[in-house]
């Protein structure tokens, strides 16, 4: 089996879709869900799938090898970021070269980089009267939002859209595509 670990900070609706998708997959399994928040709802979602969870604080994440050690102990092959809000330390990126994937709720390189995450992205899209937005699924390397793009797709932004309605449209796209793109990416790599 090829094992995935999902990192998420919040609700985890993407993590949920990914766990559903791979639940009965022949060769790929979600083996661990990690979070920087002990009360993140993603942990409940993981429990309902019987997927073990692991939480860590800032000091553990940035000043020790504990998380990397945990991933290695669990023989994790690929890392999936799904609404994970902390920057991944270089030591993890180097231990998993081209094996970390992220989803960004905009069409990178637009609306990426420092401070551009979650609702802030959708607020900026609406404030700037963008006619369209979308999702980007990309590899994570040393340059964060600049890793190789695996997939992008877009949706329109109408004048009556609000940051909340844009977020809903984006979630629909994410849920529709992220699990399949993860599968294709892993299958191409093996
Ligand atoms: C998603 O829109 C993702 O692109 C962004 O954070 C959101 C996470 O949503 N980085 P969820 O926790 O998967 O519901």
Image (cartoon, grey):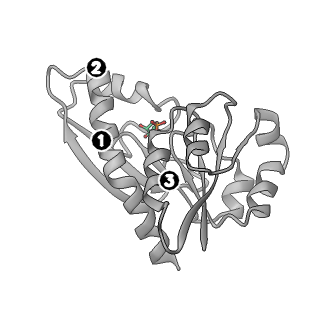
Distance, label 3 to label 1, CA atoms, is: 16 Å
Image-based side of 1 in relation to 17, left or right: right
Q: Residue 158 location, x and y as percent? A: 14, 27
Q: Residue 41 location, x and y as percent? A: 56, 32
Residue behind label 2 places its C-beta within 8 angstroms of ligand 1: no
Would you say residue 159 is visible in this rendering? Answer: yes
Would you say residue 146 is visible in this rendering? Answer: no
Distance, label 3 to label 2, CA atoms, is: 34 Å
- Residue of label 2: 127
Decide which of tag 3 and tag 1 comes sooner along the chain: 3
Q: Residue at the left extreme?
A: 159
Query: Could you tell me which secondary element the residue under label 1 belongs to?
Result: helix
Q: Residue at x 61, y 50 (%)?
A: 50
- Seen from the viewer's position, the closer of residues 35 and 129 is 35
Image-based side of 47 in relation to 130, left or right: right
Residue 8, above or below 142 = above
- Seen from the viewer's position, the closer of residues 74 and 132 is 74
- Seen from the viewer's position, the closer of residues 24 and 65 is 24
Q: Residue 60 location, x and y as percent? A: 82, 39
- Residue of label 3: 19
Q: Residue at x 28, y 19 (%)?
A: 127
Using the image, tell me which numbered label, if any, was put on residue 172. Answer: 1
Q: Residue at x 62, y 51 (%)?
A: 51
Residue 156, above or below 146 = above
Decide which of tag 3 and tag 2 comes sooner along the chain: 3
- The image quadrant of residue 58 is top right
């Amino acid at each position: 089996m090829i094992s995935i670990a999902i990192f998420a900070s919040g609700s985890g609706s993407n993590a949920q879709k990914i766990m559903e998708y791979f639940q009965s997959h022949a060769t790929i399994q979600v083996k661990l869900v990690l979070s920087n928040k002990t009360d993140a709802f993603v942990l409940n979602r993981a429990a309902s799938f019987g997927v073990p969870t692991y939480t860590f604080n800032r000091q553990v994440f940035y000043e020790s090898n504990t998380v990397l050690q945990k991933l290695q102990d669990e023989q994790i092959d690929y890392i999936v970021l799904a609404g994970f809000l902390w920057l991944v330390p270089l030591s993890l990126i180097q231990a998993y070269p081209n094996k970390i994937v992220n989803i960004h709720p905009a069409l990178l390189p637009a609306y990426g980089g420092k401070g551009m995450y979650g609702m802030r992205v959708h607020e900026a899209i609406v404030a700037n009267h963008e006619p369209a937005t979308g999702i980007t699924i990309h590899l994570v390397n040393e340059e964060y939002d600049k890793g190789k793009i695996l997939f992008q797709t877009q949706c329109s932004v109408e004048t009556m859209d609000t940051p909340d309605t844009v977020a809903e449209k984006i979630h629909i796209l994410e849920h529709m595509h992220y699990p399949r793109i993860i599968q294709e990416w892993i299958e191409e790599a093996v």
